[in-house]
Image (cartoon, rainbow, N blue to C red):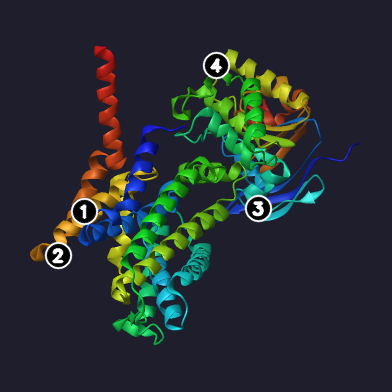
Amino acid sequence: MMTFPRVAAAVFGVLALAAPLMLERGTLNDVWSLAFAVILASAWNLLGGFAGQVSLGYSAFLGIGAYATVLLSLNGMNPFLTLPLGAVLAAAFSVLIGLPAFRLRGPYFTIATIGVGEVVRVCASSVSFTGGSSGLRMPPGSFDFTLNYLSMVALAIAVVALAAFVKRSAFGQALAAIRQDIDAAESLGIDSTRFKLLAHALSAALVAVAGGLYAINFQYIAPGSVFDFRLSLSIVLMPIVGGVGTIAGPVLGALVFSTLQVKLLSIPALRDSYLFLYGTLLIVVMLFEPKGILGLVRRVLHRRLRRFYADA
Amino acid sequence: MPEPILSVKALKKRFGGLLALSDVSFSVTEGEIFGVIGPNGAGKTTLFSCLVGSLSPTSGSILFRGREIAGLPNYAVVARGLVRTHQIARPFRDMTVEANVSIGAHFGAGHRRGADARRRVAEILERTGLGERAGSLAMALPIGDLKRLEIARALATEPAVLCLDEVMGGLNPSEIVAAMSLIRAIRDSGLTVLMIEHHVHAVAGVTDRVLVLNFGEMIAEGVPKDVLRNPKVVAAYLGDDAGDA
């Protein structure tokens, strides 16, 4: 069925893909950032939103993807061919940390994931093959911004479509059951650990591909940029502010987030204040509209429609 | 005597210093309605939790269709055809009644998908009297329907043995009569039923045999009319003085 949100999403997707023909480089850069944020938020939402497992360690997967791309490219591989390898690596790592971490529930799981993210960052800055804390540069070669742009936007569209597909599938139903009552889910035959591991691996792989594309476009990565805890925090904040567990919510959150960041980063005095602003926004959302911006929009629309029908 | 479908031997569950189940042994024959009764805190729900694997027993054996299931995780026990309901209903509150039941159809022993699962779910909703509630959110249901939803979800996993944990608690007399006939109908469709129940008339009216637990120990087992007259059982429910009298 072609509902309004689907038509809007399709039109927006086509416009974003055709944008290089119409828009200038600066604006395209902003759309690239938006697409990057949409991928991170929507992929995190697969585990954090659908299954309710709030992880604060997602920079680890982004970093693994980014480092896999740079290291393999330095060894002569085509950068775009390194992306699936980074995805597999991140998925494997997600299973490795998920096996012990998913034994924990609620806030204890979240705290464990903070530890994982930090351990990975410290390791990346102290071993030699990652270039330590000074980071790594991509090998010199052909840099094609239009190609980078199209890859990131196409991946963003694919991730949102995948999230919509998962939400309607039996897999998505199992994740929803796990979120609402994990013991009741198990008592109806759901192997909760297996489904959590699957969701974790899927979202980790998608985030890793985004990390690889990030490295290809920026040409330079360091533990401080791709393994940053603030990055993990932003990945969680976007879907929560937008509307956790929904399809449009993470996209809205990513839109708000990347707009704020672009605007604030251009004012030197406010460079680091976007997290403060975002934190404030988070508190407001938690207090007044736990279903996020999307929840607010739906409520207002609902009221309008009711009034409209009452008048008619 | 036919081979028992479920056979529990010397089952023990310890929580720190508390022995919640000590040396519980019994067998259930296929097609039976088997009651488990006892005062509050007797270990009835703990027994069910150990049977389905949501708790791991400290020691003992649980043979289900001839295979050991003690210590298996809950979902694996469901896959083999043994399922339980919860005393306090635990619906997926944000899902419709239909979606709640389809979870059982998708992930239980049947592993049904698509149209096959939908047919099965519709049939179970009809049988349990929830047909008209299919589209309601679970959080909007009154207690009687919530109890039925617990049963419907468990049935959707296509079990051979259904463990009902106080499905009549909180129901009014006419709902209890309906629940009793539903339980008989479930048995007549080929299932074996284990049920924890407080309601003495319900137990006497529907079960074939009864096991009585008190402080984690078995104090009686047999047909309901004998067991309910057993002085030890009366004493457990009403206190020692009543038993002596």
Local packing at callout 4 (Cα closer than 10 Å; few below 14, some 14-19, many 20+) is few
Q: Mark 2 belongs to which amino acid?
A: Arg
Contact between marks 3 and 4 (CB within 8 A): the answer is: no
User: At which x and y percent is residue A114?
Assistant: 36, 65
Contact between marks 4 and 2 (CB within 8 A): the answer is: no
Q: Chain of mark 3?
A: B
CA–CA distance in space, label 3 to label 4? 35 Å
CA–CA distance in space, label 1 to label 4? 58 Å
Residues tagged by mark 1 and mark 3 found on one chain of the structure: no
Furthest residue in direction left, as rendered: A269
Eye-nearest disc, 1 or 3: 1
- Whether A245 is drawn above or below B122: the answer is below
Secondary structure of the residue carrying tag 1 is helix
Residues tagged by mark 4 and mark 2 found on one chain of the structure: no
Which residue corresponds to mark 2?
Answer: A271
Furthest residue in direction right, as rendered: B1
Eye-nearest disc, 1 or 4: 1
Which residue corresponds to mark 4?
Answer: B172
Q: Earlier in the sequence, mark 1 or mark 2?
A: 1
A49 and B113: which is toward the camera: B113
Residue drawn at (34%, 39%) of the image: A8
CA–CA distance in space, label 4 to label 2? 65 Å
Q: Could you say which quadrant of the image residue B112 lies in?
A: top right
Residues tagged by mark 1 and mark 2 found on one chain of the structure: yes
Q: Mark 3 belongs to which amino acid?
A: Pro
Which residue corresponds to mark 3?
Answer: B57
Eye-nearest disc, 4 or 2: 2
Q: Is residue B168 left or right of residue A110?
A: right
Secondary structure of the residue carrying tag 2 is loop
Q: Chain of mark 4?
A: B
